[in-house]
Amino acid sequence: MADIESARTVFEKFDANGDGLITAGEYKSAMAQLGDPFVTETVAQAIINSHDANGDGLLTFDEFWAAQNKG
């Protein structure tokens, strides 16, 4: 299980504009900064969609946290 404070820190790095939501563009950018320049916006959106509980195409902290704590 992830530590919620560590998860919040990581979430904030992905949430570039600080609006509390991670977009596909923000996810792609963060992954590139972390050394994975091969994540396209399409791939980023698919990853977000797989954890997007409310279907809005964005990732909230609660959805991010839930994804960190899956099995």
Image (cartoon, rainbow, N blue to C red):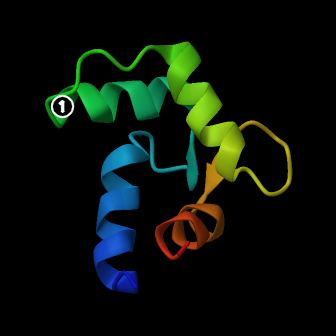
The residue depicted at 22 percent of the width and 26 percent of the height is 36
Name, please, the residue furthest toward the left: 35
Spot occupied by residue 38 in the image (x, y as percentages of width and height): 30, 15
* In the displayed structure image, the side of residue 12 where residue 18 appears, left or right: right
* CA neighbours of label 1 inside 10 A, class few (<14), some (14 to 19), many (20+): few
x, y percentage for residue 31?
Answer: 29, 33
Residue lying furthest front in this view? Answer: 71
Residue plotted at (74% across, 36% down): 57
Residue hosting label 1? 33
In this rendering, position of residue 8 left or right of residue 30: right
Q: In which image quadrant can residue 30 be found?
A: top left
Residue type for callout 1: Gln
- Counting labels gives 1
Q: Where is residue 25 shown, x and y percent of the image?
A: 49, 23
Establish if 5 lies above or below 33.
below
Q: Secondary structure at mark 1?
A: helix
In the picture shown, does residue 57 fall above or below 43?
A: below
Look at the picture and state if 16 lies above or below 6. above
Q: Residue at x 43, y 34 (%)?
A: 27
Choose top left, top right, bottom left or bottom right for residue 39: top left
Name the residue located 57 percent from the left edge and 15 percent from the top edge: 42
Taking 54 as reference, is 26 left or right? left
* Image location of residue 71, percent across then percent down: 53, 75
Quadrant location, the N terminus: bottom left
User: In front here: 33 or 12?
Assistant: 33
